[in-house]
Image: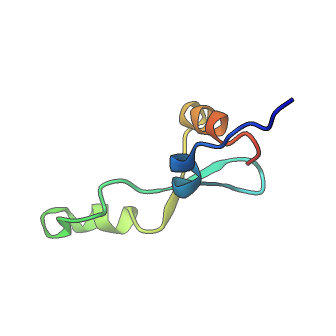
Amino acid sequence: MPKLKTKSSAKKRFRLTGTGKVRANVANKQHGMSKRPQKMIRKARGTMILSDADARIVKSYLPYG
């Protein structure tokens, strides 16, 4: 069998944790932070764990992840 290809966009944006959950950056943090509430800026700090439905899609893009 040939090797499966990983989606290049997914390997740049997502990482898998040790337990198999998908970790991603929080959205809406690239620019325009002055117009966003301070609470949102704090909550969007760092990374987040994707929901199960989204994680199932991302894992199909990362066959060897």
Q: Position of residue 29 (x, y in %)?
A: 31, 62
**Residue occupying the point 15% across, 70% down:** 34
Residue 41 lies left or right of residue 5; in this view the side is left
**Residue occupying the point 74% across, 36% down:** 4
Q: How many circles with numbers are drawn on the protein?
A: 0
As rendered, which of 51 and 27 lies closer to the eye?
27
Instruction: Work out whether 25 lies above or below 57.
Output: below
Query: Residue 40 lies in what quarter of the image?
Result: bottom left
Q: Position of residue 50 (x, y in %)?
A: 55, 45
Quarter of the image with the N terminus is top right
As rendered, which of 35 and 65 lies closer to the eye?
65
Task: Point out the residue furthest to the right here.
Answer: 1
Instruction: Work out whether 41 lies above or below 54.
Output: below
**Residue occupying the point 66% across, 38% down:** 59
Q: Position of residue 55 (x, y in %)?
A: 60, 38
Q: Position of residue 31 (x, y in %)?
A: 22, 65
Question: Which of the colour schemes (rainbow, by chain, secondary structure, one colour) is used?
Answer: rainbow
Residue 62 lies left or right of residue 50; in this view the side is right
Residue 48 lies left or right of residue 31; in this view the side is right
**Residue occupying the point 73% across, 39% down:** 63
As rendered, which of 16 and 19 lies closer to the eye?
16
Task: Point out the residue furthest to the left here.
Answer: 35
Instruction: Work out whether 59 lies above or below 8.
Output: above
